[in-house]
Image (cartoon, grey):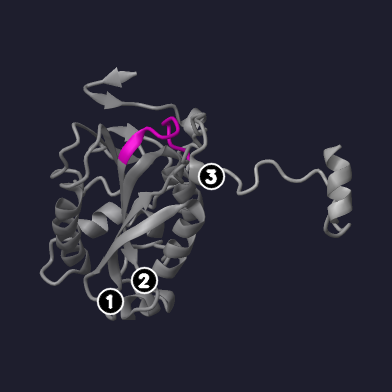
C-alpha cells in the first residue's frame, strides 16, 4: 500500500527482525567536534556521491543508514531507502535486508552504508544483494576492517564504533563476493591502519555463452581434396604388383 509516496510492507511477510541495530543513525548524526560518527558520515557521503554518479539503470536501493542519502547524486530515476524499523520516518520502505521484497534481477544499484557491520546476518544480506542485482549491476559496500586500530579496540570493548556493531571485515567480504560471483572493481580507504573504513564497489558477473554456429554447406576447394581420391583396390601389405599379374588384370 502506498501512502504519501512511501511503501509500507508487512512485517509478517518479509520479517523485520532480526535486522539493523537502531544505534547506527544516532552515531552517524553526532555533531560534537571530533566525534567519530561525524567524520565517518562526511567521508561516506563524499565518496558515495562520487561512486554512484557513473552507475546507470532504472532502480536503485539503499539498505540501512537512512540518515545518509547515499543516492543523492545518482542519475537513476527510481531510488529508495530501506529501513528495518518503522521508527525511521526517512525511509521509503521497511524490510529486513536479508529478505528483500524484490524479484530476482530487478535492481541496478544497491548501496550498503555500514550495513554488513550492523546487521545480525550479513551473509544472508549478501545473498539477497546478489539475487536482486541485474547482470552487470553494482553494489557499493562500506564498513570497518578488523585489521585496524578501531577494529581491535572495538573487539576489546571500546565504544568508539556504534553500539552493537559487528565488524564483518574486508577479507570476509571479498571472499563472500567471490563465492557469489561478484567482481570487485575498486576499493578505497579512509585511513586503513587507524579506522579501517573502506568503500568497495562490486559488479555482478554473468558468464557469457557463445553460440556454436553450424557451418554452411559448400563444395570443397581443390586444396581440401585428398591426394589420391581413387585409391588402388589392392589390399595393403601384399607387396608390389608383378608384370605378369598386371597382364592378368588387364585381360
146 lies above or below 15? below
Residue under circle 2?
145
| Dot placed on the residue nearer the N-terminal end, 3 or 2 | 2
Between 127 and 86, the residue placed more toward the observer is: 127
Cβ atoms at labels 3 and 2 below 8 Å apart? no
Mark-to-mark CA distance, 1 and 2? 8 Å
Cβ atoms at labels 1 and 2 below 8 Å apart? yes
| Dot placed on the residue nearer the N-terminal end, 3 or 1 | 1
Question: What residue is rendered at 19% in x and 53% in y?
Answer: 51
Residue under circle 1?
192
* Residue 64: x %, y % from top left: 32, 47
Labelled disc at residue 60? none
Q: Quadrant of the N terminus?
A: top left
Residue under circle 3?
224
Q: Which residues are magenta?
A: 99-108
Residue 91 is left or right of residue 73, and the answer is right
Residue 229 is left or right of residue 84, and the answer is right
Residue 229 is left or right of residue 244, and the answer is left
Membership of 35 in magenta stretch:
no
92 lies above or below 206? above
Label 3 SS = helix
Amino acid at each position: 500500500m502506498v501512502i504519501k509516496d512511501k511503501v509500507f510492507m508487512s512485517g509478517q511477510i518479509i520479517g523485520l527482525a532480526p535486522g539493523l541495530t537502531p544505534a547506527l543513525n544516532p552515531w552517524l548524526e553526532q555533531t560534537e567536534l571530533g566525534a567519530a560518527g561525524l567524520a565517518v558520515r562526511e567521508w561516506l557521503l563524499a565518496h558515495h556521491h562520487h561512486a554512484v554518479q557513473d552507475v546507470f539503470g532504472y532502480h536503485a536501493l539503499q539498505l540501512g543508514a537512512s540518515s545518509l542519502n547515499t543516492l543523492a547524486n545518482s542519475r537513476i530515476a527510481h531510488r529508495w531507502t530501506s529501513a528495518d524499523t518503522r521508527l525511521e520516518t526517512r525511509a521509503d520502505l521497511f524490510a529486513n535486508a536479508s529478505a528483500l521484497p524484490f524479484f530476482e534481477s530487478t535492481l541496478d544499484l544497491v548501496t550498503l552504508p555500514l550495513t554488513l557491520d550492523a546487521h545480525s546476518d550479513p551473509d544472508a544480506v549478501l545473498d539477497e544483494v546478489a539475487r536482486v542485482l541485474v547482470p552487470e549491476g553494482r553494489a557499493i559496500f562500506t564498513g570497518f576492517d578488523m585489521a585496524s586500530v578501531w577494529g581491535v579496540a572495538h573487539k576489546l570493548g571500546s565504544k568508539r564504533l556504534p553500539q552493537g556493531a559487528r565488524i564483518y571485515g574486508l577479507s570476509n567480504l571479498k571472499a563472500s563476493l567471490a563465492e557469489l560471483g561478484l567482481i570487485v572493481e575498486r576499493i578505497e580507504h579512509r585511513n586503513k591502519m587507524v579506522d579501517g573504513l573502506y568503500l568497495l564497489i562490486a559488479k555482478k558477473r554473468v558468464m557469457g555463452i557463445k553460440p556454436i554456429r553450424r557451418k554452411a554447406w559448400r563444395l570443397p576447394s581443390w586444396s581440401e581434396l585428398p591426394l589420391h581420391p581413387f585409391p588402388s583396390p589392392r589390399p595393403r601389405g601384399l607387396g608390389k604388383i608383378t608384370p605378369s599379374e598386371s597382364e592378368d588384370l588387364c585381360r
